[in-house]
Amino acid sequence: MSLLSKYNDGPTTFHIRFSIVPWILLCFRQKSSSKETFFFSHSSKNENSTLYSVSDDITIIVYTSSNTDDYNSVDKTEYVNPIVDSAHLVKPKIYSEKDIRDGELTKMFVNLSGYIIQKKKDCVDITYLDSIDINAPMFENILIRIVHSAHILNILNISTIISMK
């Protein structure tokens, strides 16, 4: 049994929508209830950026949520990102799936999340960072486990790809 399947009886939905900025929709279903959660985030991959003090050996992949209008008829939460000030500059309108529009899923917000990948002489270091506003106090612990499990699987997948090269 994988770490993710221990807490998430899926299917975990993962969509990437491309416009000017790639948008990520990630949905989780909890094993212990019929409750589903989701978040939208936008992503950027920065290589050799002086803004992040990145060198030839370091890649940063980072994503964050902004105040997305997902046409949710129930949850009109106004999101203000407490970490990334510039996130408020992006206010996309995304015509979401029916279950999101109908308010059947709980909305989470990614304050800041991502990976720092550093090539070393004999290995690759992968650092994962995460700050998420779960927005569901009753289910906070289980949702944090689900999200962290998904990221651990991503790290394992990245490690496998790197070791094959």
Image: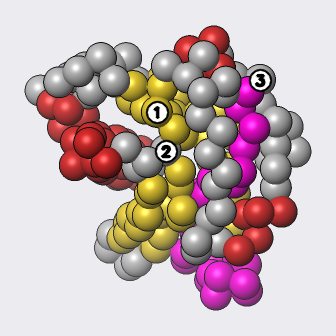
Please give the residue where the numbered disc 1 appears in the rendered image.
106
Q: Residue furthest left?
A: 1
Vertical placement of 38 versus 125: above or below?
Answer: above
Residue nearest the observer in this picture, 18 or 58: 18
Q: Estimate the x, y position of residue 120 in percent, counting from the top left.
A: 40, 77
Helix, strand or loop status at disc 1: strand
Residue nearest the observer in this picture, 61 or 99: 99
Could one spot residue 31 in this view of the protein? yes
Residue 50 sits in quarter? bottom right
Vertical placement of 124 versus 36: above or below?
Answer: below
Q: Are marks 1 and 2 in contact (CB under 8 Å)?
A: yes
Please give the residue where the numbered disc 2 appears in the rendered image.
108
Q: What is the magenta range?
A: 48-71
Label 1 amino acid? Thr
* Label 3 environment density (alpha carbons within 10 Å; few <14, some 14–19, many ≥20): few
N-terminal of the two: label 1 or label 3? 3
Q: Residue furthest right?
A: 20
- Quarter holding the N terminus is top left
130 displayed left or right of 97: left
Q: Estimate the x, y position of residue 21 in percent, counting from the top left.
A: 80, 47
Q: Estimate the x, y position of residue 38 in percent, counting from the top left.
A: 49, 34
Q: Is residue 69 magenta-colored?
A: yes
Please give the residue where the numbered disc 3 appears in the rendered image.
95
Residue 35 sits in quarter? top left
N-terminal of the two: label 2 or label 3? 3
Q: Estimate the x, y position of residue 95 in percent, counting from the top left.
A: 77, 23
* Label 1 environment density (alpha carbons within 10 Å; few <14, some 14–19, many ≥20): some
